[in-house]
Image: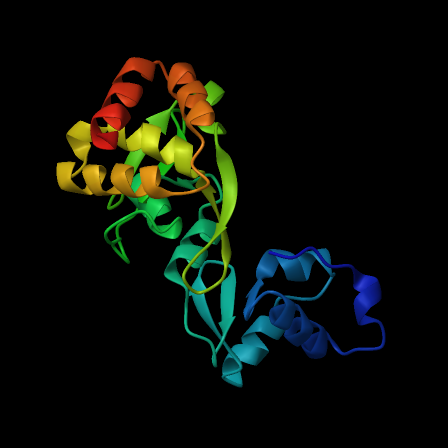
Amino acid sequence: MEKLTIKEFQDKSNIEIIEELMKKNNGYITSKELDMFDIHRMYLSIMQEKELIKKVATGIYIDTNKIEDNYFVFGLSMPNIIYSHMTALYFHGLSIEASTDVYDITVKRSYNSVHLRKHNVFYVDNDIYELGLTTVETPMGNKVKAYDVERCICDIIRSKNRMDSEYIKHSVREYIKRKDKDFVKLSSYAEKLGIKDSVMNYVGMMYE
């Protein structure tokens, strides 16, 4: 979410400040943001009573005139997750489809949360956790953390036993068609992940 300063909101009431914050955050506000601006959280309750906002997750609220973005809300409520594999490829336009309630996500091996149980969770070591990390837009235009295309291609080949083989083939073929594909980066990532031969052989097979 966009970082803002208190100077932007001088001479405004607390509710006006919250409304301005929500405009700049595509209709969202968090209780942590209110703490940063030294605004009491009771104003969230007041705005809920007036049906100006509704709670969509712990500490996260949305303008009642907005449609909830499940991808964004989940990422905001679980800051340690990174969208990966087919879910991230969906954001990149390389997946056939993506579930709206079960996501492919990657976390550090040491991380554990009951809120992740229904999702396809991939655990990785710290040294590769941020490899290929970027920011992408959801279909509703909100920014979330996800892996870049090359990391995703490596991941779906690396985790092929947990993925639909036809989905993998489709994504790799679509990647090959992209003008911005980067085989050097793909090879570098694959080497760091210890799967260089597997990745390059698979991509080569799809290239023919």
Q: Which quadrant holds residue 82? A: top left
Q: Image height check: is 141 above or below 174?
A: below
Name the one closer to the observer, 55 or 124: 124
Q: Position of residue 193 (x, y in %)?
A: 38, 18
Q: Which quadrant holds residue 161? A: top left
The residue under the point 74% across, 61% down is 38
Could you tell whether 92 is left or right of 32 in the image?
A: left
Quarter of the figure that contains the N terminus: bottom right
Q: Image height check: is 58 above or below 131?
A: below
Q: Is residue 115 visible?
A: no
Q: Image height check: is 31 above or below 150?
A: below
Q: Which quadrant holds residue 47? A: bottom right
The residue under the point 33% across, 50% down is 90
Could you tell whether 39 is left or right of 163 in the image?
A: right
Name the one closer to the observer, 103 or 11: 103
Name the one closer to the observer, 64 or 175: 175
Q: Position of residue 96 (x, y in %)?
A: 23, 51
Q: Position of residue 56 (x, y in %)?
A: 42, 65
Q: Is residue 179 visible?
A: yes
Q: Among all residues in the image, which is located at the extreme front?
A: 208
The residue under the point 32% across, 47% down is 94
Quarter of the figure that contains the C terminus: top left
The residue under the point 50% across, 29% down is 130
Could you tell whether 39 is left or right of 194 in the image?
A: right
Name the one closer to the observer, 57 or 159: 159
Q: Among all residues in the image, which is located at the extreme bottom?
A: 50
